[in-house]
Amino acid sequence: MKNIFKTSYLIILLLVGTNQVIAAEKVELLKTDWSFKGLFGKFDRGSLQRGYQVYTEVCASCHSMKYVSYRNLFEPGGPEFSEDQAKAIAANFEVTDGPNSDGEMFTRSAKLSDKFVMPFANVKAAQAANGGAYPPDMSVLAKARSGGVDYIYSVLLGYENPPSGVILDDGVYYNKYMYGNNIKMSEPLSEGLVEYSDGTIASKEQMAKDVTTFLMWTAEPHLEARHKMGFKAILYLIILTILVYFSMKKIWSRIESEV
């Protein structure tokens, strides 16, 4: 009998937890006009470059991008900085290399072939600097999170004062769109936080859209090539369908004439 009660209690807890997760997922995410959506979608180059600036000045102190190289910044389909600009960006960072001829490690300026420099030496160092929480790597974040870019955009703009009766622990913040509504990252964006070199006004919405666009590109750098390939495939199938239709029509017309 005791086992039955325990089993029933666990089932109730699971059902309640599941309902809470479903309720959290039902919160309608913020929407915006993404240039890369749809069959003919393309990345906005200006938004990608601004997004890289937001990432560098706001996010890079905590969040890594271990799958992205500095050379990717000037390759087709991405932010398309010039090669000289990409080299200058890389030169601002130092990486540990070696060993040298003396068997010692040394530091040097980053090169285009290097991955983005990590903000922390290891996971434990990252957790120690962030109250025990590990800031996730952002390389593929836009594809790893349910809701994708809409979810990231919403979370960046979803910070609010907690509802009446909700008590948060120290170092925890209320976010309307975060799963569970609790997040350990303080609000990262504020009006005019960065100064865009192209003169774009750095509103919270603009910065959130730009950095999310950049994250979408890092997660799917070949998106434009895939869209082009998809369009060609559809066009090929349409032409093939038309040819098959007229071929079949011609074949059946002969059979009817013989009858």
Image: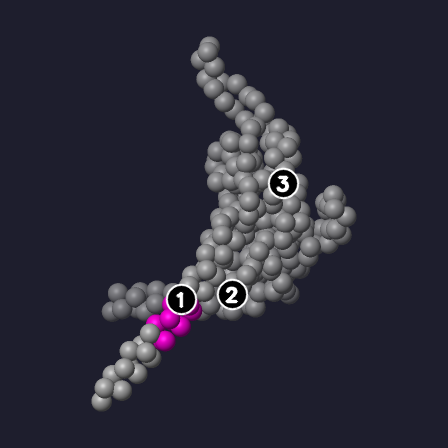
Task: Locate residue 254 relative to residue 165 in the image: left or right.
Answer: left
Can residue 244 be found in the magenta stretch? yes
Span colored in magenta? 237-246
Task: Say what secondary structure mark 3 lies in.
Answer: loop
Residue under the image location 52 percent in, 37 percent down: 69
Q: Are discs 1 and 3 less than 8 Å apart at CB?
A: no
Q: What secondary structure is marked by label 1?
A: helix
* Badge 3 amino acid: Phe
| Majority SS type along the magenta span | helix
Q: Amino acid at mark 2?
A: Ala
How far is disc 2 from disc 3 in space, using C-alphas? 39 Å
- Residue 197 placement: quadrant: top right
**Disc 2 vs disc 3: which is toward the camera?**
3
Separation (CA) of disc 2 from disc 1? 41 Å
1 or 3: tag closer to the N-terminus? 3
Dot 1, how many residues are within 10 Å of its Cα: few (below 14), some (14-19), or many (20+)?
Answer: few
Which one is nearer the viewer's eye here, 38 or 231?
Answer: 231
Q: CA distance from mark 1 to mark 3?
A: 36 Å
Circle nearer the N terminus (2, 1): 2
Left or right of residue 134: residue 245: left
Name above or below for residue 6 compared with residue 194: below
- Of residues 71 and 245, the one nearer the viewer is 245
Residue ID for mark 1: 237
Residue at the farthest top position: 102
- Circle 2 or circle 1, nearest the eye: 1
| Residue that mark 2 sits on | 24
Q: Considering only order in the chain, which callout, 3 or 2, is on the residue closer to the N terminus? A: 2
Within-10-Å neighbours for mark 3: few <14, some 14–19, many 20+: many
**Residue at image coords 69%, 55%:** 206
Please state the horizontal and vertical placement of residue 242, each as a whole percent of the image. 40, 72
Q: Which mark is residue 81?
A: 3
Which residue is drawn at the image coordinates 61% and 65% (left, top)?
Answer: 31
